[in-house]
Amino acid sequence: MTSTLVSAFAVVSVRAQPVSQPPQILQPPSSATKRAGTRVTFAVVAEGSPDLAYQWRKDGVPLADDGHFAGTGSSSLVITAAAASDVGAYSVEVANAFGVARGDVAMLAVQPWRPWRVVGSDPNTDEITRRVFVDGNRAYLANGYVYFEPTPNTGLRIVNVSDPTSPRRVGAWRANYAEASSVVVSGDRAYVALRTSPPLGLAIVDLSDETNPRTLGIFDSSATVGHGIDVAVSGTVAHAALGAQVLILDVSDPAHITSLGSWTNLYSFSRLVLSGTTAYVAGSGLQVFDLTDPTNPLRLGGVSPANVIYR
């Protein structure tokens, strides 16, 4: 009886047998166009029973690691510095004990390296251009001091660059002895960050007559937050980095610029970039702000050093 029960309830175990899976290429390498001297990587994604062996080829000829080529027997082929001689068709063969798979050909094109070449210039003989903004065939230069002294070209300068080989000065604007540290143009208005000598802050300039730009309004921060560093504009709102503050300004009436909100850092800012309602402000690290509510800028985060105070 006992023998019968044991036999009835015996557990039969089946040993799993390995699956013989030949290699299969899931993602072949992609063609590429690279500049001479740059690094090139061709990669393949394959599956199959281990162990998979890889062999890369150029124009059908097997490659070997030699300092110029690396990873010729792996899933990623690297050309350390592309040259004209590397132009061609690259393919990979993946093999195991159960078969061989060959991927689609990837073409490599190598563009010649050409150094920068100056095609034209408008020499600054007596000032430093701190920032440039280009709109169509106009370049707007934010000019600062040379040797700590203002010059006739300190401020905003407008240059016609329709012929890059022969830039031509169109007009200029200045505010007392203030340096221009940054400029952006929106429509027929230029927004100029001013520093060093009063008036500091932000100026709005009428460009309807480029040969004779005129002041529409100035937000003078001389007595409060200090130097104008950078500015970004969205519609009728200007976002200005002034000293250690980010100010959100209503510029709908340039003659009466008003502050909507602000955020204060411990250290001076150096650059402000606006992306939608998010501001990225550099200076002692990076600060990121949500400006959805301009009356209440919200700091989203920052990277070290990011010592901050809230006001």
Image (cartoon, helix red, strand yellow):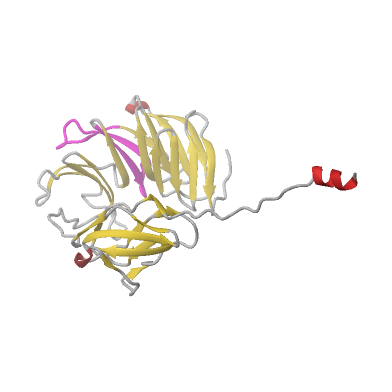
What's the magenta region? 189-216
Picture residue at 78% right of the left edge, 46% below the top:
10
Is 168 situated above or below 60?
above
Q: Position of residue 199 (x, y in %)?
A: 36, 41
Q: Position of residue 230 (x, y in %)?
A: 37, 44
In this image, 126 relative to 198: left or right?
left
Residue situated furthest right in the rendering: 1
Q: Which of 250 and 287 is in front in this view?
A: 287
Residue situated furthest top in the rendering: 253
In this image, 217 relative to 19: left or right?
left
| Residue 17 highlighted magenta (yes or no) | no
The answer, for residue 111, to whether it is visible in the render is yes
| Residue 211 highlighted magenta (yes or no) | yes
In this image, 68 relative to 299: left or right?
left
Picture residue at 31% right of the left edge, 51% below the top:
30
Indicate the quadrant containing the C terminus: top left, top right, bottom left or bottom right.
top right
Q: Position of residue 15 (x, y in %)?
A: 65, 54
Q: Nearer the viewer, residue 275 or 179?
A: 275
The answer, for residue 75, to whether it is visible in the render is no
Is 213 situated above or below 228?
above
Residue 305 figure quarter: bottom right
Residue situated furthest bottom in the rendering: 66
Indicate the quadrant containing the N terminus: top left, top right, bottom left or bottom right.
top right
